[in-house]
Image: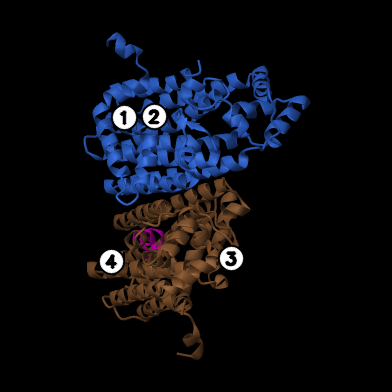
Chain colours: A brown, B blue
Amino acid sequence: MGLDEVSQKPHERLAAWLAEDMAAVNGLIRERMASKHAPRIPEVTAHLVEAGGKRLRPLLTLAAARLCGYEGPYHIHLAATVEFIHTATLLHDDVVDESHRRRGKPTANLLWDNKSSVLVGDYLFARSFQLMVETGSLRVMDILANASATISEGEVLQLTAAQDLRTTEDIYLQVVRGKTAALFAAATEVGGVVAGVPEAQVEALHAYGDALGIAFQIVDDLLDYGGVDAQIGKNTGDDFRERKLTLPVIKAVAQADAEERAFWQRVIEKGDQREGDLEQAHAIMSRHGAMEAARQDALRWVTVAREALGQLPEHPLREMLHDLADFVVERIA
Amino acid sequence: MGLDEVSQKPHERLAAWLAEDMAAVNGLIRERMASKHAPRIPEVTAHLVEAGGKRLRPLLTLAAARLCGYEGPYHIHLAATVEFIHTATLLHDDVVDESHRRRGKPTANLLWDNKSSVLVGDYLFARSFQLMVETGSLRVMDILANASATISEGEVLQLTAAQDLRTTEDIYLQVVRGKTAALFAAATEVGGVVAGVPEAQVEALHAYGDALGIAFQIVDDLLDYGGVDAQIGKNTGDDFRERKLTLPVIKAVAQADAEERAFWQRVIEKGDQREGDLEQAHAIMSRHGAMEAARQDALRWVTVAREALGQLPEHPLREMLHDLADFVVERIA
């Protein structure tokens, strides 16, 4: 292994190993994004699909399928499916969150409008559905249908949990499973299913994706308070402004004294936010070790993810998935 | 046949004939609408699902399946699927159209908010997807996946066609197939597919639903200018205010003199609408016989729908579907 390979990040090594498959996925995405009747569709989606996201989810599907020895054509369809579902949820999330940037560019709903975001998201869902049907696997459709339901349930739950200081770590975990882990878990699981591996390995792939997704989202939520804007292409403090109860806040609220509790009630429940409040929130969380405790939780999920890989065959891709799990938390080290 | 039966409208006769099936569909809808984790979901959907819509689409699926002699359990799943897809598109359409009433009640996005409408719509799509998977029929999933893509393409096309006086009758037809006929056609087609009838009959069911849906939407668009608010539970003039190019407008624009053209440019292209403009639009359309010409188009689609039924077995439900096609246009008589 040369120096170049050592210095590459795990998702870059995955992308390099799976470059040929990934090129096929990108070709399929471009082909299926097109609409004879509605040229606005590729205009809106190109903006997101070409924006240079890491394509982590399709890489997971390809890696799972190849690691399980799959040689057929359908892992390409499934990887494109997963990316379409992800892009559709981003479009709908843009309407939802009134966020202003995504992957460092203006969101679709600022360039276009809410209407286009909703409808083009629906179009991508429909396209992903067509792609799955082409695989001819009812099992795959069952997994992705269940993931879709979990995703939207999680998003709705997040809506009702926002601004509510009674939100527990259990509710947070449900939200995170919905918004992130369900699609990660489905992405890896369908890779194993299409390869026809034994049930224990399918379950291990699901467990890996689930734990990786949870760790990934906890870290994302930490970074939202961490001021590493450039690294994640998302405005720091978004969650604070949207009054979301993410893990470090939940942990800090649980230990709040009377004065801190009044602070959280004002900024989260009442939404009365003033200059310097974000820094104050950060200071309170640090004082209680809430950031570090959340990081430790993420590390525990990384361990779960790595242990799940033990069920799978030895393979260079398995090592990369192992390193990817570590890397997810190293982002905040 | 007693007097009561004679005086019933065709969809009421369908509902009476299929009452037992429909009760099962309603039970399944209530069961699948529930969410353990996100109680807001049934709150939002109950508002729409219980609002006393005619349930036309699930009735079409049940009628098609029974007319084709189906005795299994899955027409219930498919009817619920179709109603979930319809309800999801209504929720997303509420975000889209900024309309203020739906079925005579405030829309979900006024009672709740845009976020809930988008996400709960997504949840219903996911639920519909799970229901289809349970039928175990790839053919059914293929039909419904294609219908979903056509629906969202039609909605996006409508967005880009709005405010554009160059919109042709062909584009209008594509929009109408997307927003209405695709789901009508899928609703009847899957009824035949689940019953396992020969291909010619499946095609006839598709053709019936397609033509019925087109006629239905043309009439809806006429009624939007017709001032029969109470009858359709939708504000008259909505399409005019949203600057949609519906069939009577397209026909009137095609015959416009210079002065009328300037009027349409002002109210539709520039969106500069003043007191009395809706009445003026109505007067111009009447002068060119545009309303009547659109009604004649709807009647031609009714004929197509009725002729398609000729391919299907003789059955009391076939007669009701026949009468339903007539009734769709009689609404404006």
In-image side of B276 versus A130 (left or right): right
Residue matched to label 1: B63
Q: Chain of mark 3?
A: A
In-image side of B287 versus B29 (left or right): right
Local SS, label 3: loop
Residue A116 on image: x %, y % = 56, 48
Q: Tag 2: residue type?
A: Gly
Q: CA distance from mark 2 to mark 4?
A: 45 Å
Q: Tag 3: residue type?
A: Gly
Q: Tag 4: residue type?
A: Gly
Residue matched to label 4: A196
Check disc 1: other Cα within 10 Å, few if <14, some if 14-19, many if 20+: many
Q: Chain of mark 4?
A: A
Q: Magenta includes B169?
A: no
Local SS, label 1: helix
| Mark 1 or mark 2: whose residue is earlier in sequence | 2
Q: Chain of mark 1?
A: B
Q: Is residue B2 visible?
A: yes
Q: Magenta includes A183?
A: yes
Q: Residue at x 47, y 26 (%)?
A: B233
Q: Residue furthest bottom?
A: A2
Q: Chain of mark 2?
A: B
Magenta stretch, main secondary structure, is helix
Q: Which mark is residue A104?
A: 3
**Disc 2 + disc 3, Cβ < 8 Å:** no
In-image side of B328 versus A170 (left or right): right
**Disc 1 + disc 2, Cβ < 8 Å:** no
Does residue A276 lie above or below B318 as drawn? below
